[in-house]
Image (cartoon, rainbow, N blue to C red):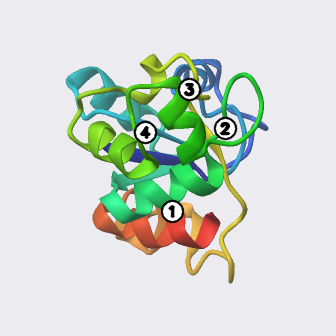
Amino acid sequence: MIAIVRIRGRVDVKPEIRRTLEMLHLNRKFWATLVPLTDSYRGMLHKVKDYSTYGEIDGPTLSALLRERGELKIGGSLSDEWLSSNTDFSSIEELAEALLSNRVYLHKLGWIKPYFRLHPPKGGFKRTTKRAWNDGGELGYRGKEINTLIRRMI
């Protein structure tokens, strides 16, 4: 499972890239989403690499993200009590494991919003937001380092 965080804003974005960001449910700066790593999503990630950062999310970070920033479409936040009474999942950790093992997909769950609205990272970005991760910036693929960024943004 890949976590994507939009880093750059909405001004002067080419229409093709804007539509791709909308398909990924990344309409605003500092919004995040989860997608499986398929060929289709790989092409979309390549297209939006200059506006976002992405990498492999781990279990504890995903559980914290769902617990702190998960929102229901009917309003309110995601909780263990709501999950156990309204879904087949008994806890947020069980939902996180199902997402990580690709048994369920975030965008196909009808009761949770397919994005997470995050804060700017505590302490700010350590590098520039105009260059790729490999070139000393914050954009593009960063692997497991996405977990430290998401934890600072929750």
Which of marks 3 and 4 precedes in the sequence? 3
- Residue at the image position 64 percent from the left and 50 percent from the top: 69
Tell me if mark 1 has few (under 14), some (14-19) or many (20+) residues whose alpha carbon lies within 10 angstroms of its own: some
Question: Is 131 placed above or below 111 here?
Answer: below
Which of marks 2 and 1 precedes in the sequence? 2
Amino acid at pointer 4: Leu
Tell me if mark 3 has few (under 14), some (14-19) or many (20+) residues whose alpha carbon lies within 10 angstroms of its own: some
Residue 65 appears left or right of 56: right
Amino acid at pointer 1: Arg
Q: Nearer the viewer, mark 2 or mark 4?
A: 2
Which of marks 2 and 3 precedes in the sequence? 3
Q: Is residue 50 visible?
A: yes
Disc 1 is placed on an element classified as strand
Tell me if mark 2 has few (under 14), some (14-19) or many (20+) residues whose alpha carbon lies within 10 angstroms of its own: many
Location of residue 25 (image quadrant): top right
For label 2, the residue is 71
Q: CA distance from mark 1 to mark 4?
A: 23 Å
Q: CA distance from mark 2 to mark 4?
A: 14 Å
Disc 2 is placed on an element classified as loop
Amino acid at pointer 2: Glu
Residue 24 at x, y percent in the picture? 51, 27
| Cβ atoms at labels 1 and 2 below 8 Å apart | no
Which of marks 4 and 1 precedes in the sequence? 4
| Cβ atoms at labels 3 and 1 below 8 Å apart | no
For label 1, the residue is 131
Q: CA distance from mark 3 to mark 1?
A: 17 Å
For label 3, the residue is 17
Quadrant location, the N terminus: top left
* Pick the front one: 9 or 71: 71
